[in-house]
């Protein structure tokens, strides 16, 4: 098992620390891990990590996705529900806004957030199957992002992190896109 200091002692998964860096080190060492259990350990650690700090699974969730627009402007928007200690609100964001958030956060915070998995662009992106899969991946991304920044989770703190979290900021498009 890879330890925090980088030493490898073989990966049993029993004492897995809920850290993306730790998972990365454990996967790199490759000892006693098959592709199947590596995937399971990684997902379990991510879920444990998300629940462990600031209870991010109750703070942010993507509850739905909606097909918007017409013709070649058709796209999915994801319903992002945010529940901080001081407020509750919902925003609708399309994948391109999530991607902008991802790129800005990587630029702004560097290594602190660069290992958080983000769903890649896809050629046939306006299908129900893609939207359903992205919903889960984007929710995981947001939860891990909030957790990794270590900020107190208030409405003001989230909006200071990025306008992505501000209601009404992207709702000016022809099809009420966000």
Image (cartoon, grey):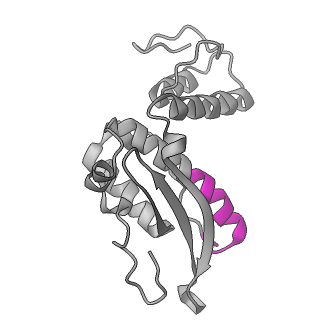
Compared across the picture, whether 131 is left or right of 152 comes to right
Residue 114 versus residue 33 in the image, above or below = below
Q: In which quarter of the image is residue 71?
A: bottom right
Q: Nearer the viewer, residue 39 or 28?
A: 39
Asked whether the viewer can see residue 116, the reply is no
Residue 114 versus residue 107 in the image, above or below = above
Q: Quadrant of residue 77?
A: bottom right
Q: Which of 82 and 125 is in front in this view?
A: 82
Q: Give the range drawn in magenta.
A: 123-137
Query: Residue 97, percent across and down?
Result: 42, 66
Residue occupying image coordinates x 48% and y 46%:
59
Q: Quadrant of residue 16?
A: top right
How many labels were placed on the picture? 0
Residue 132 falls within the magenta-colored stretch: yes
Residue 91 versus residue 31 in the image, above or below = below
Residue occupying image coordinates x 45% and y 68%:
96
């Amino acid at each position: 098992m890879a330890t925090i200091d980088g030493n490898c002692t073989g990966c049993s998964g029993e004492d897995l620390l809920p850290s993306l860096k730790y998972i990365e080190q454990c996967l790199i060492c490759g000892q006693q891990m098959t592709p199947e259990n590596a995937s399971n350990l990684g997902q379990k650690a991510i879920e444990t990590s998300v629940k462990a700090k600031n209870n991010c699974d109750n703070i942010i969730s993507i509850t739905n996705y909606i097909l918007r627009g017409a013709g070649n402007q058709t796209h999915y928007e994801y319903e992002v529900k945010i529940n901080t200690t001081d407020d509750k609100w919902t925003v609708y964001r399309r994948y391109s806004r999530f991607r902008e958030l991802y790129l800005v956060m990587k630029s702004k915070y560097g290594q602190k957030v660069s290992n958080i998995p983000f769903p890649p662009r896809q050629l046939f992106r306006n299908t129900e199957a893609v939207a359903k899969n992205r919903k889960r991946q984007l929710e995981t991304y947001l939860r891990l992002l909030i957790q990794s920044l270590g900020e107190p989770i208030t409405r003001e703190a989230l909006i200071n992190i990025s306008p992505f979290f501000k209601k009404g900021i992207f709702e000016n498009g022809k099809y009420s896109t966000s």
